[in-house]
Each structure stands twice: as C-alpha cells, then as structure tokens.
Amino acid sequence: VDAEYMGLEGADQERFDRLRYVELKHGRIAMLAIAGHLTTTAGIRLPGDIDLSGTSFSSISSGIKGLNEVPTGGALQIFAFVGFLELFIMKDRGFLGLGAPGQFPGDFRNGFDFGWDKQTEEWKTQKRAIELNNGRAAQMGILGLMVHEELGNVLSILPPGAAI
C-alpha cells in the first residue's frame, strides 16, 4: 500500500503511535462485538428485564436488529457508560489522563500491573502482535457478520442452533 495514499508519507512517530492506538482500540471493540454477537445468537442472555415496563433481555434480538429493540433509556445508559469509559478510564495516560504515559500505544493498565512488567520484552512484543492481529481479524469478522445479517443469511454461516 502506498504511504502517500494512506496519508503516512513523512509521518512522525507520534502520528504512527496515534494510529496504532486507534487501531488497537477499534480491534478491542470489534473483539467484544464478535463475542457479544455470537453469545446472544447462541441464545445466552441475561436473566430478567432490561427495563421497568417488563421488556426481557431474551425478547431482544441479536445483531443489528436488536439495536432498534433496546429501550431508549437503556441505549442512553449504554452510550453514557461508554462515554464515561472513553473520557475518564480508558486513557493512555492513566485515570483521568493524569498519570504517566503508557509504555506503548494502547497501554490502558492505568497504573495496575497484572504481571505485565515481570515478562520478557520478547513475550510482550509477541502478545502485542497477537492482540493487534486478533483485533484486525475481529474487525473483518464483525463486518462479515453484519453484511450476512443484512443479506439475510447469517444463520447459514453460524453453528447449528443459532437464532436471531
């Protein structure tokens, strides 16, 4: 791919790191989307109701169709929660953006270690590459699921027993 076409010709390390950060974040969201789509399509839902009027979680379809079936209040809560995470928690510079910068783009540990610092540099590089590649695959995967859902044949590509 041509660097000029991609807008990367003459780009500095800061620009590259920003693009890598965005790519990782989109990959993480896509991995969650794939997991959520496959889980709900397999019929696994939270017990109980999503709102006080009695709309049950199990009555909401999976996939794109389900987006229109979530009550407005629930959709606003999801939007507010994701916005809160985006603005205050999932920062490359720690909680509220007040901490030291992460060691690499997409480092959202926010001061918590979880054993990462005890690993070798080779291990860390391998795990970051695995996450990047899994994120890329998930982005293509969720796009494929959405296209097949709109074409009306998503169940033909999912395991037997799946339902929308």
Image (cartoon, helix red, strand yellow):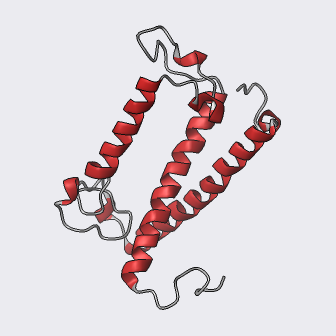
Quarter of the figure that contains the C terminus: top right
| Closer to the camera in the image, 155 or 116 | 155
**Where residue 16 appears, x then y in whole percent?**
44, 78
Q: Quadrant of residue 5?
A: bottom right
| Closer to the camera in the image, 141 or 160 | 141
Q: Is residue 93 above or below residue 50?
A: below
**Where residue 111 appears, x then y in whole percent?**
21, 57
Q: Is residue 124 above or below residue 44?
A: below
Q: Is residue 127 visible?
A: no
- Residue at (21%, 59%) from the top-left corner? 97
Quarter of the figure that contains the N terminus: bottom right
- Residue at (35%, 70%) from the top-left corner? 104
Q: Quadrant of residue 76?
A: top left
- Residue at (49%, 15%) from the top-left corner? 47
Is residue 72 found left or right of 163 in the rendered image?
Answer: left
**Where residue 150 appears, x then y in whole percent?**
75, 40
Considering every residue shown, the one lying at the far top of the view is 54
Numbered-mark total: 0
**Where residue 128 appears, x then y in whole percent?**
46, 66
| Closer to the camera in the image, 162 or 147 | 147
- Residue at (52%, 83%) from the top-left corner? 8
